[in-house]
Amino acid sequence: YLSTFSCLVWLIMGCCVMVYSLENLAALMGIPDAIMGVTVSAAGTSLPAYISSRIAAERGFGNQAVASVFGSNTFNICVGLGLPWVIYT
């Protein structure tokens, strides 16, 4: 359980840093936070899921690839992005 908890802590901390960095970058570039969140943040959280799903599918694990897509995106939305926003506000 310690490793799972540790991974969650690092994920939450990484997401907080990402949100903070994107807000500062958006302010520096004069881009609205909403636009920055929809584009850069969405790509940054979805790209690892795409890569892992593609590798799994290429190795013949189609079920694992589909499960990875749904599982990782659901987890990212609920925990990876939800908790840092709750903590930040």
Image (cartoon, helix red, strand yellow):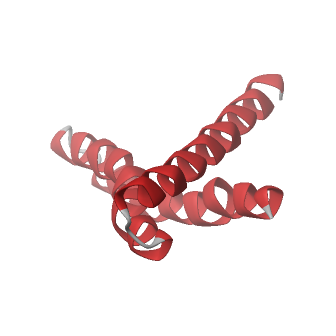
Task: Give coordinates of residue 31: x percent, y percent.
Answer: 38, 68
Residue at image x 49%, y 69%?
33
Task: Give coordinates of residue 80: x percent, y percent.
Answer: 63, 54
Q: Quadrant of the C terminus?
A: bottom right
**Which residue sits furthest left?**
58
Can you tell which quarter of the image residue 4 is in?
top right
Can you tell which quarter of the image residue 56 is in?
top left
* Residue 34 shows in the view: yes
Residue at image x 58%, y 65%?
77
Task: Give coordinates of residue 14: x percent, y percent.
Answer: 60, 38
Can you tell which quarter of the image residue 10 is in?
top right
**Which residue sits furthest top?**
3
Q: Quadrant of the N terminus?
A: top right
Residue at image x 44%, y 73%?
32
Q: Is residue 33 left or right of residue 7?
A: left
Q: Front-most of 34 and 6?
A: 34
* Residue 67 shows in the view: no
Q: Is residue 74 left or right of residue 26?
A: right
Residue at image x 75%, y 35%?
9
Q: Is residue 10 left or right of residue 24?
A: right
Task: Give coordinates of residue 20: x percent, y percent.
Answer: 60, 49
Compared with residue 52, is residue 69 higher up or lower down, i.e. above or below?
A: below
**How many numbered marks have been drawn onto this rendered protein structure?**
0
Q: Front-most of 66 and 12?
A: 12
